[in-house]
Amino acid sequence: MFDPDYALRRTDWIEISRVITVHRPSTRLVGAMRQGDSLVWSADTYESVLDDEFGILLRLAAKVGGSVIAEAYIVECTFNEAIDDRVFATDPPPGSSWMELG
């Protein structure tokens, strides 16, 4: 499993530019893992994009010889908006009911 915290702490990063990613002000970084460490993908260098306000990893790409060999990124995100209570509803499916235990 990929651990963003581990990736950010075990890589020596250099800020490259400010960018807009998923409509958010972000910072683009390039780095290499420290000696003896590796991420999900073995690569020469990694490129990441972090949200400026929350520090959330929005994109991670692995590069070998300057070419991207693998990447993971956020397509859409929303911050500071109320979440509808129905998202976390625990109502049983139609035609069934909860069984009381105990």
Image (cartoon, rainbow, N blue to C red):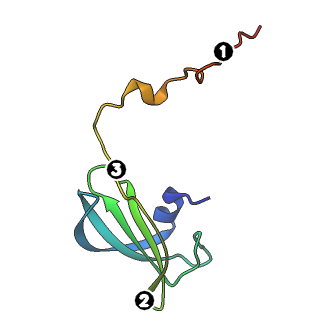
- Kind of residue sitting beneath label 3: Cys
- Secondary structure at badge 2 equals loop
Label 1 to label 3, Cα distance in Å? 34 Å
Classed neighbour count for the residue bearing mark 2: other residues with Cα under 10 Å, few (<14), some (14–19), many (≥20): few
Q: Which mark is residue 77?
A: 3
Residue type of the residue flagged with mark 1: Trp
Task: Mark 1 and mark 3 in contact? Answer it, CB < 8 Å.
Answer: no
Label 1: which residue?
98
Q: Quadrant of the C terminus?
A: top right
Seen at 34% across and 54% down, the residue is 76
* Residue corresponding to mark 2: 66
Q: Residue at x 59, y 24 (%)?
A: 93
Q: Secondary structure at mark 1?
A: loop
Which of the two discs, 1 and 3, sits closer to the camera? Answer: 1
**Residue 91 locus on image (x, y percent):** 55, 20
Report the label total. Answer: 3
**Badge 1: residue crowd in 10 Å (few <14, some 14–19, many ≥20):** few
